[in-house]
Image (spheres, rainbow, N blue to C red):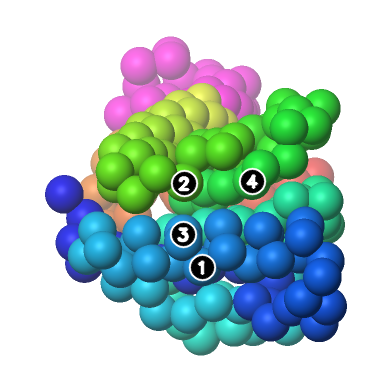
Amino acid sequence: MNEALRIVVVAPDLAVADPDDEHAVEQAERSRALRIGLLENNFNLVATLPADVFLSERIAQLQPDLIIVDAESEARDALEHVVMATRDERRPIVMFTNDEDTSHVKDAVAAGVSAYIVAGLAPQRIRPILDVAMARFQHEQALRAELADAKTELRDRKTIDRAKGLLMQRQGLTEQAAYEKLRKTAMDKGLKLVDVAQRMLDVMDLLG
């Protein structure tokens, strides 16, 4: 479905300072397996980045379609960096972790994480997980757009109603006549009805 999907992985460095640190070795192997799984599933892994103060700039430069956060004990900090980096331009975020402490899953989802996967790195699971995450993100974006349109429509309607009310009050027009006057002015000037209404309100405010 998403062979051309451009993916950035946010993860710790694979280099392990202490080879006797079993946890660090295990985390590095898990992270390596994730990256290999992405490549095996024909995803376009454009970069692997650390969760640091430069993350926003790097993501802005790379313009990925999807961001994967691969973290364990530092999951909350890594996620905060990613959320900050995508607040101006939302992107689907998928989190892979072996940390079984799910106390912050609710906060992660509220922050925009499309999928939160615990111990789910089997290669055959990666594609369906990312496909579902993309579909969920697109659905949520469509709902946000619908909500924004509804809010704009309501605001515009209130503006037009206020302008009609002023015309009715000051010129003794009926509601229909006031609306027709606004509509004719908008057509004559090549403007939106709400823009004419707002300009009229601004002038009335200036004149008192």
What amino acid type is highlighted by mark number 2?
Answer: Leu
- Viewer-proximal residue among 202 and 15: 15
Neighbor class of circle 2 (other Cα within 10 Å; few <14, some 14-19, many 20+) is: some
| Picture residue at 38% right of the left edge, 26% below the top | 179
Q: Give the range drawn in magenta.
A: 157-182
**Disc 3/disc 2 C-alpha distance (Å):** 6 Å
Disc sitting over residue 97 in the figure: 4
Do labels 3 and 2 touch, CB within 8 Å?
yes
Distance of label 1 from label 2 (alpha carbons): 10 Å
Foreground disc of the pair 4, 1: 1
Distance Cα–Cα, label 4 vs label 2 = 9 Å
Measured in 3D between alpha carbons, the distance from the residue under mark 4 to the one under mark 3, in whole angstroms, is 11 Å
Q: Which of 40 and 175 is in front in this view?
A: 40
Q: Is the residue marked by circle 1 packed among few (<14), some (14-19), or many (20+) residues within 10 Å?
A: few
Residues packed near mark 3 inside 10 Å, few (<14), some (14 to 19) or many (20 plus): many
Identify the mark at residue 166; answer none if there is no mark.
none
